[in-house]
Image (cartoon, rainbow, N blue to C red):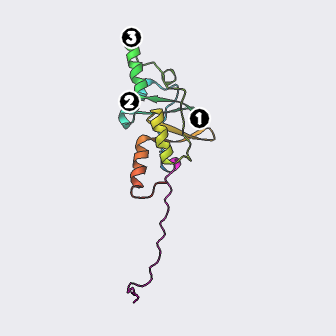
Amino acid sequence: MAIKSFQGARKQSKKEEIKPAIVSDIMSTKLITFKPNQLVSEVMEILIKNRISGGPVVNDQNELLGIISEGDCIKQISESRYYNMPIDNDTVDKHMVKDVETIDGNLNIFDAAKKFLESKRRRFPILKNGKLVGQISQKDILIAALKQKGQNWK
């Protein structure tokens, strides 16, 4: 005796494969940047006012020259006391990190997360044709991962 189903034919649902976001999709593009001849004291004020921990240093052509961070500013404060020099006349180019690691805008967020872990950096600038186009932070990766929560991570 055969058993008949009263549910009828069911449509096979295709699970959509969700591709993880890429860096250029989630990077910040409205950046606060600094100039190499800018005073460190001015940078400190901007960092505090905008509640950021650092930012890229660029020239007039928007080419990346370095990164200046709170840590760089604190180091400058410490050195100024040691050498008994006021901080008012010190410029960014003397204190910024010049050897800056960048990240590819086409990298997916999981590979970017791995790069953050390996490098111990808090942010990476993104360049396109030698020009600064954005920046990605660890927080950007966290936000993107939460948005993909419940999806298939491939």
Q: Which residue is painted at 47% across and 74% down in the image?
A: 12
As drawn, which residue projects farthest toward the front?
1
Q: CA distance from mark 2 to mark 3?
A: 22 Å
Q: Nearer the viewer, residue 89 or 17?
A: 17
In this rendering, the answer to whether 23 lies above or below 65 is below
* Left or right for 95, reference 51: right
Q: Which mark lies nearer to you, 2 or 3? A: 3
Q: Which residue is mark 1?
A: 63
As drawn, which residue projects farthest toward the top?
83
Q: Which residue is mark 2?
A: 45
Q: Main secondary structure of the magenta part?
A: loop
Q: Which residue is mark 3?
A: 82
Q: Which residue is painted at 56% across and 42% down in the image?
A: 104
As drawn, which residue projects farthest toward the bottom?
1
Q: Which residue is painted at 47% across and 66% down in the image?
A: 15
In the image, residue 6 lies in the stretch drawn in magenta: yes
Q: Position of residue 130 (x, y in %)?
A: 62, 38
Q: Position of residue 149 (x, y in %)?
A: 39, 55
Q: Nearer the viewer, residue 65 or 150?
A: 150
Of the residues shown, which amino acid type is indicated by label 1? Glu
Q: Earlier in the sequence, mark 2 or mark 3?
A: 2
Of the residues shown, which amino acid type is indicated by label 2? Glu
Q: CA distance from mark 1 to mark 3?
A: 33 Å
Of the residues shown, which amino acid type is indicated by label 3? Tyr
Label 3: which secondary element: helix
Q: Earlier in the sequence, mark 1 or mark 3?
A: 1
